[in-house]
Each structure stands twice: as structure tokens, then as C-alpha cells.
Amino acid sequence: MKRRDFLKLAAAASVAGCAGSAAPSRARVVVIGGGFGGATAAKYIRLWDPSIDVVLIERESQFTSCPISNLVLGGFSTMQEISRGYDGLRRHGVQVVRDEAVAVDAAKKTVRLARGGEIGYERLIVSPGIDFTFNEIQGYEAAMQSGRVLHAWKAGPQTVALRSQLEQMRDGGVYILSIPTAPYRCPPGPYERASMVAAYFKKAKPRSKVLVLDANPDVTSKGALFKAAWKDLYAGTLEYRGNAKAVGIDGSTVKLEVEDVKGDVLNVVPPHRAGNIAQQAGLITTNNRWCDVDWRTMESKKVPGIHVLGDATLSAPGMPKSGSMANNHAKIAAAAVIEQLNGRAPQPVKIINTCYSFVSEKEAIRVSSVHEWDATQGTLIGVKGSGGVSAARSEPEATYAWNWARTIWADSLA
Ligand SMILES: Cc1cc2nc3c(=O)[nH]c(=O)nc-3n(C[C@H](O)[C@H](O)[C@H](O)COP(=O)(O)OP(=O)(O)OC[C@H]3O[C@@H](n4cnc5c(N)ncnc54)[C@H](O)[C@@H]3O)c2cc1C
């Protein structure tokens, strides 16, 4: 074992040891998942009430952002640019434990770690993102294990592998992007990806083609803006087909309900559900996939004392699964947890979503919305007259998109 790994294990064991013995002397919040939701919650609890101990359990050594990862696929950004370490959180006094949370005992209020030991909590925050229901696409797992198909819908090694497949593809080849039925993480994300790959092909492999097979009847977000960009910039390169749900993979063929389509690079994004640990912890409430929460506190409607954030939640009406939303959910939860631990009643919070998509290397489009608590409906609803989409794609929107990304990475992790 490397010295560095030994030290990390020792750190985990010391937190676990604490939990196993007497109750902690200060209130302790444990956070599972150091993505947009979990990292932000851990940081803001420490910022707003430094008397609370915060332990963040994250299985990866660093944060890799899905936002901007489509630009990496197009060759317009790098993995280094979209990666951040966890030292920023440590500087806020968050204890970062590199491990996998494998079980939650809500009665004992403990989280079990893959490398052994348990950590006790007074409040638990679960922000594990998504996992996939691979079995809904016949042959998917075998094809993924052989490297024949990738989703690259969690930024990391698959992003690098997909970029390399695109680089190696012959000019004149077909890149297939298959989109699952909504809800999935980042509604405009697939259409941005199709645009980035088309931009790359136009520059480097002009005889190649992007074929978008969408299980949904039509483009699910910023439809008119994407379609205008595709017509103006990628006519003859990018083809879009709605109502084209992938049901199987066989060699270089994606099987749809009514036909088979052959491609050179198969980028099939499977249907999603809340991350595995949410299921293990009994937090799933809806369609065997998502976790319903009280939107005033993000507390699970099923398991008291546990708050669920981000993509794992059953989205409120009109609310996308986005990094922007996960970051906002985290602030609702951080404020609520502090109030609850101090014996006060949490107040509802208004939140904002902004989601940029690049349609070319230098131009982007935007959608935004504002969500507020509605006591009659018992959920967050869109504020009438708020938000909307860009008037047209533009270079200033691309500058705002980069600024948004750098700001949210810093807000969540620095
Ligand atoms: C291609 C693409 C582009 C996107 N672009 C945008 C965009 O432009 N704007 C935007 O707002 N959103 C965008 N998104 C969506 C955004 O990435 C997600 O909505 C966001 O990451 C959700 O945050 P989260 O905290 O729920 O999950 P994540 O950010 O996925 O974080 C989950 C974390 O939990 C960890 N984890 C999971 N289970 C465990 C466990 N048991 N133990 C320990 N650690 C665990 C994971 O390793 C991960 O670090 C995009 C997504 C994709 C795929």
C-alpha cells in the first residue's frame, strides 16, 4: 500500500473510530457524494455554522465536472480544465474521507464504509448523483465491458475513452448518440454533445456524420435554438431522429424498437435512476428510481433525518436535473440542517437554475428558471414570468457559460 493511501485509510478509520465509540461532542453532519450537491452542502454548513463537524465521503480522488465535458469531447477543452481537488473543502474544515459509502443504518444513524468502519451522524445528506438501469438495453453491459459502447454521462475515464474513439474513427464514419427517455441528467446535455462532436467533425473529419437517436419525441430543451444551430452550422453532418428508443446493442448495431442502425462509435446513454446508495438506504419513493423530498429542507419523505440532493431527487415540476440545481438544493439543505440542529424551524428558500449549452466552439445558448415554495401545492414551482431562453446563439453567451462554470466550481469546491 502506498504511504498516501495508508494515510487516507488511517484518516477514515479515525473518523469511523470516533463514531463507533461515544457520541460526538459536537453535532456531526455526514455527506455522501462530493459532486455539485454534496460538496456545496459540506462547504456551506461549515461556512454558515462552524460549530458543526462535517464529514464528506467521496469515492473519487477528485471532482470531474460534467458541465464543459462535452467540450472535451469536441477537443475544445481538457480533462485538467474540468477537474478540481478537494483541498478547498478541507480548508473550510470539512473532513474529506476517500471511500465508498456502502450502507446506511437510519435507526442507528451510521454510514458503513467499503474499506471498513462506520461513521455516526446526527443528520445525513445523500447526493450520489445517478446510476443507470443498463438492463433496459439488451446487451449493454457486455458491450460496455468490451469497450464497444460508452455513455460518458459521468465525466471521467469514459469521457477520455469516447474522445479517443472519436479521434480514431475513420473520416466518413458515423457517431451515434442515443438519448434515454426523460427524466435524465441535464436535459440539453445530449444536444450540446451532438453539436460539439459535429463541430469537431466539420473541422477534422468532414465526411463523417453525427446521428442523434432520441427516445423522446422531440428535443427536450432549447429545441428551437438547437435546431436553428444545426441547420445553420451542421447541415449534412448532423441528423436528428425523435421517437428512436434504443432497446439493444449488438456489435456495431444499435437496435431500436422498429429498426436497426449501424455506427462506428456508439455513445448510448442508458436510462437513469438515483445513485445506488440511495436505493440501499431505502430512500427511493417513485417509479423505483427517484427520491421524493420536502422541498423546504430537502429531507427525505421516507426516511427522517436524511436529506437527498441533486439528480437523485424526484424533480419538482419544471425543475431539471442539473449541476446548477444540485448546488441550489445544497444551500436549502445546509440552511435547513443548521436550523434543525439549533432547534429552529427552517424557512423555505427561492432557488434559480441556469443552464448554458455550447452549439459551436465559440457560441452558446441559455435556459434559466426561478423556483419558489408553494404551500398549497406543497412543492417548489416555477415563478410566473421568470426565466426563459436566449434570444439567439451568441459569443457573449459562450463567455457567460465559461464564467458560470468557473464560478460554480469555485462556489461548490473552493
Ligand atoms: C454531458 C453533461 C453535461 C452537463 N452540463 C451541465 C451544465 O452545463 N449545467 C448544469 O447545471 N448541469 C449540467 N450537467 C448535469 C450535472 O452534471 C448534474 O446534474 C450534477 O452533477 C448533479 O449533481 P449531484 O451532486 O446530484 O451528482 P454528481 O455531481 O454526479 O455527484 C455525485 C458524487 O457522489 C459520489 N458518490 C456516489 N455514490 C457514492 C458512494 N456510495 N460513496 C461515495 N461517493 C459516492 C460520486 O463519485 C460523485 O462524485 C451535465 C451533465 C452531463 C452528463
Image (cartoon, rainbow, N blue to C red):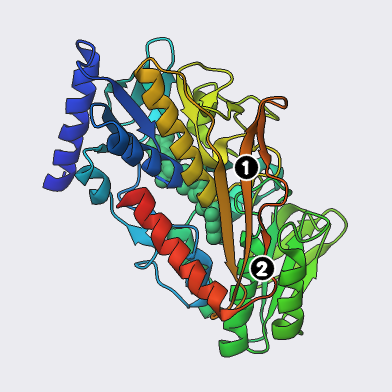
Q: Is residue 204 visible?
A: yes
Mark 2 Cα within 10 Å, few/some/many (few <14, many 20+)? some
Q: Quadrant of residue 118?
A: top left
Label number found at residue 371: 1
Mark 1 Cα within 10 Å, few/some/many (few <14, many 20+)? many
Question: Who is closer to the viewer here, 25 or 97?
Answer: 25
Residue at the image position 44 percent from the left and 38 percent from the top: 331
Residue at the image position 56 percent from the left and 37 percent from the top: 312
Question: Who is closer to the viewer here, 330 or 87?
Answer: 330
Q: Amino acid at mark 2?
A: Ser
Label number found at residue 337: none
Residue with the mark numbered 2: 390
Q: Please say if the residues under marks 1 and 2 sit with CB atoms less than 8 Å apart.
A: no
- Whole-percent x, y for residue 25 in the image: 19, 15
Report if the beta carbon of the residue with label 1 is closer than 8 angstroms to ligand 1.
Answer: no
**Quadrant occupied by the N terminus:** top left
Per the model, the C-alpha gap separating discs 1 and 2 is 19 Å
**Position of residue 53 in the picture relative to residue 232 (left or right):** left
Residue at the image position 71 percent from the left and 83 percent from the top: 234
**Position of residue 15 in the picture relative to residue 74 (left or right):** left
Q: Is label 1 in a helix, a strand or a loop?
A: strand
- Determine the residue located farthest toward the right in the rendered image: 258
Q: Earlier in the sequence, mark 1 or mark 2?
A: 1
Q: Is residue 146 visible?
A: no
Question: Who is closer to the viewer here, 30 or 240?
Answer: 30
Report if the beta carbon of the residue with label 2 is closer than 8 angstroms to ligand 1.
Answer: no
- Whole-percent x, y for residue 333 in the image: 45, 32
Q: Is label 2 in a helix, a strand or a loop?
A: loop
Q: Amino acid at mark 1?
A: His
- Up-down: is 86 above or below 329? below
- Whole-percent x, y for residue 228 in the image: 76, 76
